[in-house]
Image: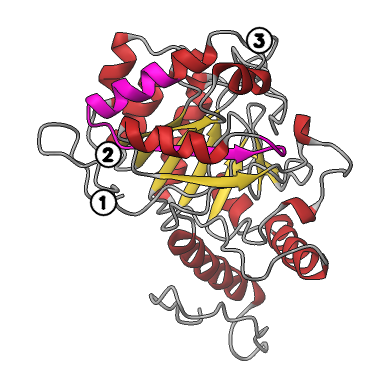
Amino acid sequence: MLPVSTDSSTPVNSRIPTAGECDFGAWMLNWLVQAWERSMSGLSFVWLEITGKCQLECVHCYADSGPQGAHGTMATEDWVAVIGQVAALGARMVQFIGGEPTLHGALPDLVGHALGRGLEVEVFSNLVHVSEPLWEVFSQPRMRLATSYYADQADQHESITKRRGSYTRTKTNIIEAVRRSIPLRVGLIDLADGQRVEHARAELAALGVTEFGVDRLRQVGRGVRDLQPDVAQLCGHCARGKIAIATNGDVWPCVFSRWMPVGNVRHQSLAEIVIGPAMSDAEQQISAGVKRNPGSDPARPGCDPLCCPSTMCDPQCSPSCSPSCRPANNCRPTGNCAPNY
């Protein structure tokens, strides 16, 4: 067998050997091992979309979630198995999303399993309702919360969420998260002229939120206005160290590229999907499409889940592509001090 490099930065040896060097089966095994090494070092962040059910019906929700949504065909044991594979592949963080992930009864157990496997965890919630047991879950080390916010006035906020009372509920639970010193990010999504985004930013700062960002509408799901979902809605960094897994087990390059499934974890291992040709083709298609898009901004930072808290990718009551590396002054000695974000 050809020697296998232990340096994950070494390119996979793509030269097919001659008969005198080794047989093709040995070469193929070596190629797969090196590809596995690359995937081990490359996957860093995974969205886990555990439900399509949500109390809200946000007008721009890319997942088209709402009260009629469901948990899908992925059973709790399926998610447990996926989390194990995510950890084995070397990822650092998972983000539980929906829909509204707090409506899934297994969320505490799934969070506990992810933490137990050494992963950092973020739950992206609308924060409309948080029970006391869930506050205890969210207060654990290596846990974060994220939410979306639209305006500093109830009528404007709720014209987007389509639920009366959602502004006050979300604001109240933002205050509670800050009080408990739970690391919290807030995504502000600018949907239209006249939306009080800057006023909302000022209100969040006054509430003690230190980590937030602003993103534009992305025309996916209910966010579609005058365009159909395509790569123009993406940042161009999809599939680079990140994937999303849907309620039916489909794997996407990111949560916004929902029309581009690259595999299904109910039928394939995650490793097979990550190093598979469909994922490679999707990454190339997205990269080429973004470069061709005349409206794309080459200076716009990518949706890097590792270290860009100011570049939010949040077109709904949504997840963000950008948990930050460090708490932004919200790591307090009396609360949840988690210095490795």
Whole-angstrom CA distance, mark 2 to mark 3, is: 30 Å
Disc 2 designates what residue? 142
Check the image and report above or below for 61 versus 27.
Answer: above
Q: Are dots 1 and 3 in contact, CB under 8 Å?
A: no
Give residue 314's position: percent from left, percent from top: 59, 41
| Residue lying at 82% horizontally and 36% vertically, measured from the top left | 224
How many numbered badges does the structure rendering display?
A: 3
Of the numbered discs in the image, which one, if any, rests on residue 340? Answer: 1
Decide if residue 135 is on the left or right side of residue 82: left
Rendering quarter of residue 325: bottom left
Give the amino acid at mark 1.
Answer: Asn
Mark 1 and mark 3 lie on one chain; the one further toward the N terminus is 3
Front position among marks 2 and 3: 3
Disc 3 designates what residue? 67
Mark 1 and mark 2 lie on one chain; the one further toward the N terminus is 2
Q: Residue furthest left?
A: 333
Give the amino acid at mark 3.
Answer: Pro
Q: Are dots 1 and 2 in contact, CB under 8 Å?
A: yes
Taking depth in this image into account, of 291 and 82 the one nearest to the observer is: 291
Question: Circle 3 — which element?
Answer: loop
Question: Circle 2 — which element?
Answer: loop
